[in-house]
């Protein structure tokens, strides 16, 4: 649910694009998530996506509350947003709080809103293989597939399950060969690619567990 206690700074409110206001022609990767907390693994995926997919920017869309994740272990939104800004440390990785201020709870609604506000941009939704495995549980997941092209990053223990998932089978005919990944942003959705990349050991779950146990890292 949208936190009512948080308010948008005036400078950010002015920068939020109105319908059709942003006319830049950019190829933008979108990484949605809780960022609870953000870590070097997120930046590794963003940097790899820019290189492999030929993106101009990657936007981290920090979610006020992921509908599929429990609230009990979720840090406050402002804290997660701050962690994302601290970790990004790249001129082409932009941390965004669109979902909070647009009032969108689901990825499908966020993508539709961004399409309206940035009609000349080409968006690539970036997610891990673990998300592809359960993608059919997402709200209006078919709309997501027809709104933005998708890049899936493999993850240990999830890849086989992801490629055998309902979503992968449904859109098998529009899967782009990995060798053609750089042209993904130029395609019309639905289209998706599965990327085999170097894995990063960082894990938000592990970081939270270490903090609770008083460990380092």
Image (cartoon, rainbow, N blue to C red):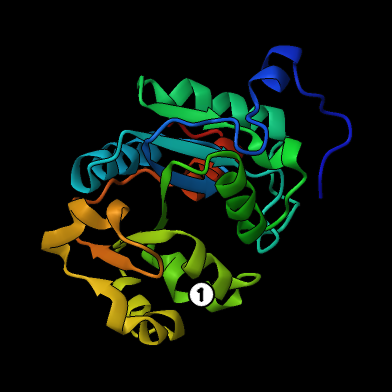
- Does residue 127 lie above or below 167 as drawn? above
Name the residue: 39% across, 37% down: 58
Q: Is residue 50 left or right of residue 41?
A: left
Q: Is residue 192 visible?
A: yes
Circle 1 packing at 10 Å, graded few (<14), some (14-19), many (20+), is: some
Q: Is residue 197 visible?
A: no
Residue under numbered circle 1: 134
- Does residue 168 lie above or below 83 as drawn? below
Residue 53 or residue 131, whichever sits in front: 53
Q: Identify the image quadrant of residue 216.
A: top left
Q: Is residue 54 left or right of residue 82?
A: left
Name the residue: 61% across, 46% down: 116
Residue pushed farthest top?
Answer: 11
Q: Identify the image quadrant of residue 163.
A: bottom left
Q: Identify the image quadrant of residue 139.
A: bottom right
Query: In the rendering, at what x and y percent does residue 81 appear?
Result: 61, 29
Residue 116 or residue 86, whichever sits in front: 116
């Amino acid at each position: 649910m949208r936190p009512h206690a948080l308010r948008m700074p005036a400078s950010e409110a002015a920068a939020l694009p109105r319908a059709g206001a942003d006319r830049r022609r950019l190829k933008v990767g979108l990484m949605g998530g809780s960022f609870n907390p953000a870590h070097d693994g997120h930046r590794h995926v963003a940097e790899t996506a820019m290189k492999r997919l030929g993106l101009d920017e990657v936007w981290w869309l920090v979610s006020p509350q992921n509908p599929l994740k429990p609230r009990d272990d979720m840090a406050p939104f402002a804290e997660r947003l701050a962690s994302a800004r601290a970790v990004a440390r790249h001129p082409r990785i932009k941390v965004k709080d669109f979902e909070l201020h647009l009032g969108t709870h689901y990825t499908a609604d966020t993508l539709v809103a961004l399409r309206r506000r940035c009609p000349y941009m080409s968006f690539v939704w970036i997610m891990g293989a673990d998300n592809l495995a359960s993608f059919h549980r997402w709200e209006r997941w078919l709309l997501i597939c027809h709104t933005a092209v998708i890049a899936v990053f493999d993850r240990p223990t999830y890849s086989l399950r992801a490629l055998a998932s309902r979503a992968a089978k449904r859109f098998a005919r529009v899967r782009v060969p990995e060798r053609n990944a750089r042209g993904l942003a130029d395609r019309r959705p639905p289209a998706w690619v599965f990327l085999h990349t170097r894995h990063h050991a960082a894990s938000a779950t592990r970081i939270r567990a270490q903090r609770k146990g008083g460990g380092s890292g």
